[in-house]
Image (cartoon, helix red, strand yellow):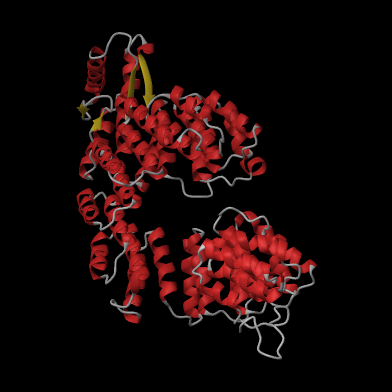
Amino acid sequence: MASTAGAGRPPWDPTVSLRLGHPALVLLERCGGGARPFKAILAHMLRLRLAFETFPMSRLLHFATVSFPHHARAAETLFEHFTPRPNLYIYNLMLSSAAAAAAAASSSPSRRPAALYMSMLASSIHPDEQTFLSLLKSVDAERRSVGKQVHAHVVVTGLHSRVYLRNSLIKMYLDAGDVEAAEAMFRCAPTADAVSCNIMLSGYVKGGCSGKALRFFRGMASRGIGVDQYTAVALLACCGRLKKAVLGRSVHGVVVRRIGVADRGLILSNALLDMYAKCGEMNTAMRVFDEAGERDGISWNTMVAGFANAGLLDLASKYFGEVPARDIISWNALLAGYARYEEFSATMILFHDMLASSVIPDKVTAVTLISAVVGKGTLNSARSVHGWVVKEHGTQDSFLASALVDMYCKCGSIKLAYAVFEKAVDKDVTLWTAMISGLAFHGHGDVALDLFWKMQAEGTEPNGVTLVAVLSACSHAGLFDEGCKIFDTLKQRFNIEPGVEHFGCMVDLLARSGRLSDAVDLARRMPMKPSRSIWGSILSASSACQNTEVAEIASKELLCLEPAEEGGYVLLSNMYAAEGQWNYSNEVRENMERKGVRKSAELSMVTNFPYFSSPPEHIKCISALTICIIMLASPLGKCIRAVEKTDVLLNFHSLHTTPSILDKYKHS
């Protein structure tokens, strides 16, 4: 409707007319979202005083928040300064915009969703379902208390029976990490539909509760709720995480029967690929990939990562070469495969090819390179990668600093590791734990313990992994009283339930201190089944103490867990040999041969001197000869860093008269 009226009719009055036909409003809908036309139309509406009225303002805000959200800043300004009487519709528009900005973690608007909601209540405007839906979208793990307050307001307003709102509340609690509250909401529902069940199932998967997800699915089947595409995607993710290939194939069969092969869609095809790849079923993954009518970058990257994780690096390289548009995920997947299987040269060649392409390496690339260096174990390579990481990412990132600390510790330079640790500005629990673990690994238990107390004094709370590192430090340094005190206060002081790793460290501490009977007793009294490493530590300690009785107990338990494990046989045989009981020693070796257990070759990472197990009388000679060759090839006074998998350096140390010539770093 034109702004000029015919004869005898008054002009168009924007304060009373609600028609959309005004030229300014028509242009607003057709301007295409450009900043310049929007500003021109806005200026025109301000001049006509259209923007000061509720309905035209609602159209402006809808345009700036819904049609073209990149004008959200302008919408906020209009709301703050030109909307004296906002109604429910306008408040809901602004709440939706603020919630979207908060969920995207973008530059936060000056008025948070909660503040907008409080302003709305202060204006005596009654909220509706859309109001609460917008508020719930802005809740995450850090604002869990806000979510509970919103839930309370939903109940007070009587809207809690709305199915869509109830499902949003369940999703909010799951996204915030409050699984128990989500389960309580689900149980209170009078009826559970497929949408509610799929929200619960997806929430379990995202929260890492794959076991709960599978049990919940069985409950769905008992309620008669069928499997749709969303259910299948969530179930396949569970099967992949738990590596349950048999159950995954069953879900695949249901998908084929109910949906078919041709109609399963891209999302479901990618979920099948991911499940089979994580389960190591790459032949089946290839068939699914070939059957897929549509493929995207996720499909190709899943195949590359699957082959790389399975060690099929040639096939991974083949698929990588066929990826239509290689992105950073494609490069990182193949790099991770080479690094995992210690193909250091291939990793570096691929990395240089990546630099030559248009793809920019990210932090995942940096961590992959660091892990490749850890596998190689050379300090020069570690320094080179460190230089590139500092050049590209600086020294402020605690995640990369943690990886660098771990790298230097495993490459034999605790000094460089501590230098990286000291330069880090924001030290999180992961960085503290990495440094404590490195000190424990190198036998500096006292320093590790001091760092542990310093960590708490600076306000960083330890987690379960930190306590494992501290207990390990006490064990390796012989700090028996300190280790026992920390272990006894895990629950009371640190609110950490002792796990198998904590019990393992305590058993090792008892065994190393000569309390072998107590170590066996603790291993048998553990609330969970002792691991192979626990009985292995008892066996090693009893072998060092020449306690045949305990060694036989530990060896028996170890071989029950791992019948093909060579370590138990070898340690027991060597202990019998050291005591001169050659008949028993030979009997253990013959038992190994009957069961087809062979001791693998060991390889020094200092230089290429492979050597195999020999009769006991020749072991020390071969070990000493290997190290002597390394020493003769090194300049006088040069520190030798040796990374070994056996006790070769320890044996040589007992023969050599000047122990300071070796800087021993021994992998346990």
The residue most toward the bottom is: 8
Q: Position of residue 497 (x, y in %)?
A: 59, 47
Q: Is residue 171 visible?
A: no
Left or right relative to 538: residue 656 = left
Left or right relative to 47: residue 469 = left
Left or right relative to 467: residue 299 = left
Q: Position of residue 369 (x, y in %)?
A: 35, 38
Residue at position x 67%, y 58% from top? 112
The answer to which quarter of the image holds residue 272 is bottom left
Q: Does 271 sit above or below residue 443?
A: below
Viewer-side residue, 571 vs 580: 571
Residue at position x 23%, y 48% from top? 313
Q: Position of residue 492 (x, y in %)?
A: 67, 43
Q: Quadrant of the C terminus?
A: top left
Q: Is residue 288 visible?
A: yes
Viewer-side residue, 150 vs 552: 150
Q: Position of residue 486 (x, y in %)?
A: 61, 35
Viewer-side residue, 542 vs 45: 45
The answer to which quarter of the image holds residue 146 is bottom right
Residue at position x 57%, y 42% from top? 463
Viewer-side residue, 131 vs 87: 87
Q: Does 591 sit above or below residue 42?
A: above
